[in-house]
Image (cartoon, helix red, strand yellow):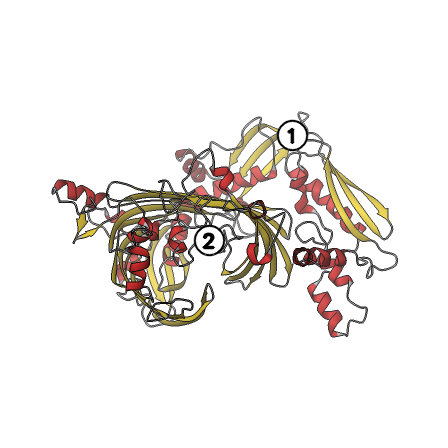
Amino acid sequence: MSRQSSINKILALPFIAVLFMASCSTTKFVPADDYLLKAVKIESEQSDVKASALMPYLQQRPNSKWFSLFKVPLSLYSMSGRDSTRWGNRFLRGLGEAPVIYDSLKAAATCDYMAMYLQSEGYLHAKASYTVKRKGRKVEVKYKAIPGISYTIDSVNVVIEDDSVHNTLQNLGALDMNLKRGMRFSIQALDEERKRITNVLTKEGYYKFNKDFVKFEVDSTINPGRVDVTMYLHKYKDSNNSPETNHRKYFINKVNFISVNSERIPLRPSVLQNNTTIKEGDKYSADEVQNTYNNFSRLNAVRFTNIHFEENEKDGLLDCGIKVSTRKPNTISFQPEGTNTEGDFGAAATLTYSNNNIFRGSELFSVQFRGAYEAIKGLDGYQNQNYIEYNVETRLAFPRIIAPFLSQSVRYDNSAKSELMFSYNMQNRPEFHRRVLTSAWRYYWKGLRGLSYRFDLIDINFVHMPWISSTFKSNYLDDTTYRNAILKYNYEDLFILKSGVSISYNSKNQAFRTNLEVGGNVLNAISHLTKAKKNFDGQYTLFKIAYAQYVKGDFDYTRLLQLDVKNQLALHFGLGIAYPYSNSNILPFEKRYFSGGANSVRGWNVRELGPGKFRGSDGKIDFINQTGDMKFDMNVELRTALFWKFNGAFFIDAGNIWTLKNYKDQPGGQFKFDTFLKQLAVAYGLGLRVNFDYFIVRLDCGMKAVNPAYTTSTEHYPIANPILGRDLSVHFAVGMPF
């Protein structure tokens, strides 16, 4: 048997196992007089009613499928024996899923719920029916929706019994209702109108008002296909036996802060006041109550907040009590980890100290120490064979904007924070020693509708190379026959001064992130104004160190499509472009793009793909050569729930990196419109994820499908000629890829 034939059989094993389980009798545990619910289908008589809108009202669904194809959970359950006291049988049943037995009562209830939904959407005479098709011990149920006429609103009338409420709504222009003549009638539209009226009044001091005081009367008997809607806003009534009175407008009398877990709240009084939008003398507002909750929830020192009101019946004033529970200010955490860099094993440990209230203003101060050690093999001609790294990082975050020349309302915007960061990193490798000093001042704030912003006012990076091995220098940096411009640039002292802004959005079904940063422009302007001299390489310098000048932009978009209860399709698109100019011909290594790895094209290991059709030839320096100025990623991932906390995924990835300039040390790596599609790498594979609620552990196995860096046709299309040792990459990561 050939080696290739063996590999093909290994790759086919998962599919053979799935087919074997699918062949098991799935009606084994179906009682004699019952039927297995094999499939459900929904149809509608009218095109304006989509079957997908009726899916949530199904009272019975067939057994779930892995990847929407295979009923593996049902097959696992069916593989168990009938003796439930045996451990093996209980184990299989725990992994699997019991057969769904067809229930005619639930089918009838489904029709009722579908009809009720359609009636609430304006199809007042809607009906639903179902038919059952039996085949052996299995049934298929087909539901048919009969919507009928869609009713529209003919007239809208408003009756307000309370004159003061009427005047308030009239003065605010809130009597102009969203219900309009000619629009389709729906219960949801009525409920939205009730919520709107309630929101308006609870912002205007009506503390005891709720949507139950708003009622609707609908008359569909006058005109066919049309309804007359009347909204009634009733007077206040404390209980069923209480007399009706006008709704009362309340004002705030006092605001008191109450400590939950100590004698006094360990926050400055000004911090409490600035985060409280409920003010003495103001009218009661539900919006200000929610704003106060939001403000306190953003304070690191606060665990939870509870706001309550006490009413003074005599004068209509409210005393506000704000209970504040705070966290313990100091925390220490220790995190060990194991490392494996291309077969070189090592260990690392991180010790972090945090204080979430260092100046009694909920300022977060943290210091993190990290040490790492790695035993490096296979380096000849170097004295020290090990890698040692030490890093210290300190951060100080303020829960407000700190900047001059800004109004108080902006500086105390509680949706924003400021952060100061310093870090020092020391790396000692057999080839070189490297020191990186970083300092940054940043602003973060939350916008409307889920938008978040980050502004790096100033970000300084100083890279110092105090020592380079004579062997490495002789072999790679000084040899005129082998000199690599990109490699040489990244082993010189470097200064980066940048500013940038990023915008992100995250919702249940989609997310995007965009980032723009520019580096060196301020320094370059100063150099021109002062008429500074250039160095031997034609670059301006700061402290005799050439500074980087570039512009960089990134965009990432992810969309999640819920196929059914247990299956989800994730789509991802990513694009990044960076361009060095003026004082730089090459991007700094930290700003360059790489491809491959757990979050990119998973058929390649990290920094093993690209740029373009470039093929690495020296593993010691390919981590520099296999970087680029542009990155493009497309990913499709079908995610499915397996059992317990385990989830699976089938993915297809495509992408690559390119250079914008033609570097002689990266032949075939430059981006060109007429060739970049041919240089897209494609991979496919399977993933296993374990969801521990707080974090997700992920194992992805990717196979090359199309390889742009090839010398033979079999290397070009590995999907037709898979070789595990050449084409398989295994990635272990924490968190989802996108």
453 and 450: which is toward the camera: 453
Residue type, label 2? Glu
Q: Quadrant of the N terminus?
A: bottom right
- Is residue 135 positioned above or below 304 on the image? above
Give the residue at x 76% y 50%.
106
- Residue 243 on image: x %, y %: 52, 49
455 and 143: which is toward the camera: 455
Which residue is tagged 2?
A: 608
192 and 530: which is toward the camera: 530
Q: Is residue 424 visible?
A: no
Q: Quadrant of residue 336?
A: bottom left
Say whether marks 2 and 1 touch (CB < 8 Å).
no
Which tag is nearer the camera, tag 2 or tag 1? Answer: 2
Residue type, label 1? Tyr
Apparent side of residue 119 relative to residue 464 in the rendered image (left or right): right
Q: Quadrant of residue 219?
A: top right
Apparent side of residue 355 relative to residue 143 in the rendered image (left or right): left
- Is residue 463 positioned above or below 377 on the image? above
Task: List the single residue furthest toward the left.
Answer: 530
Within 10 Å of the Cα at label 1, are there few (<14), some (14-19), or many (20+) other Cα atoms? many
Within 10 Å of the Cα at label 2, are there few (<14), some (14-19), or many (20+) other Cα atoms? many
- Residue 477 on image: x %, y %: 29, 55
Q: Secondary structure at mark 1?
A: loop
Q: Is residue 71 visible?
A: yes
- Residue 729 on image: x %, y %: 54, 57
Q: Which mark is residue 151?
A: 1
Give the residue at x 22% y 46%.
406
- Is residue 542 positioned above or below 96 on the image? above
- Residue 404 on image: x %, y %: 20, 49
Q: How many marks?
A: 2
Q: Quadrant of residue 561?
A: top right
